[in-house]
Amino acid sequence: MQLPKDPVILLSYINTQLRDNYASFAEFCAATGCSPEDIIRTLEAVDYHYDAEANQFC
């Protein structure tokens, strides 16, 4: 799966997917084959971190 390269667009896309389709970030990554490390690294670079309780990056 090709994810957006822009961190802000990636943030919006991931959070929308988590809200609408997946119970967790791990489930999203498993279903889409995306690298959790790459996503986390990209979003941490713009100061966003995954909150498992909220199931979103904030």
Image: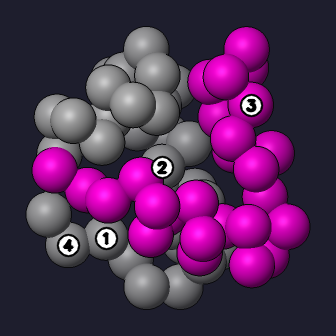
Q: Position of residue 16 (x, y in %)?
A: 49, 40
Inter-mark Cα distance, 3 to 4 = 23 Å
Is the C-beta separation of discs 2 and 3 under 8 Å? no
What's the residue type where badge 2 is placed? Ile
Q: Is residue 55 above or below residue 45?
A: above
| Residue position marked by numbered label 1 in the rendering | 3
Circle 3 sits on which residue? Answer: 51
Which callout, 1 or 3, points at the residue further toward the start of the chain? 1
Q: Which residue matches tag 2?
A: 14
- Residue 10 lies, in percent from the top left, at 51, 67
How far apart in space, not on screen, are marks 2 and 4 (Cα)?
12 Å
Pointers 2 and 4 in contact (CB under 8 A)?
no
Q: Which mark is nearer the camera, 3 or 4? A: 3
Callout 2: helix, strand or loop?
A: helix
| Mark 2 residue crowding within 10 angstroms, few (<14) / some (14–19) / many (20+) | many
Decide whether residue 57 is among the magenta residues: yes
Q: Which residues are magenta?
A: 33-58
Of callouts 2 and 4, which one flags the residue occurring earlier in the amino acid sequence? 4
Label 2 to label 3: alpha-carbon separation: 13 Å
Is 49 displayed left or right of 47 in the figure? left
> Identity of the amino acid at label 1?
Leu
The reply to whether the C-beta atoms of the residues labelled 1 and 4 are less than 8 Å apart is: yes
Q: Is residue 7 magenta-colored?
A: no
* Furthest residue toward bottom: 5
Numbered disc in front, either 2 or 3: 3
Q: Which numbered circle lies on residue 2?
A: 4
Q: Residue at x 69, y 41 (%)?
A: 50
Residue 22 in sight here: yes
SS at mark 3? Answer: strand
In the rendered image, the quadrant that contains the N terminus is bottom left
Picture quadrant of residue 8:
bottom right
Whether residue 2 sits left or right of residue 13 in the image: it is: left
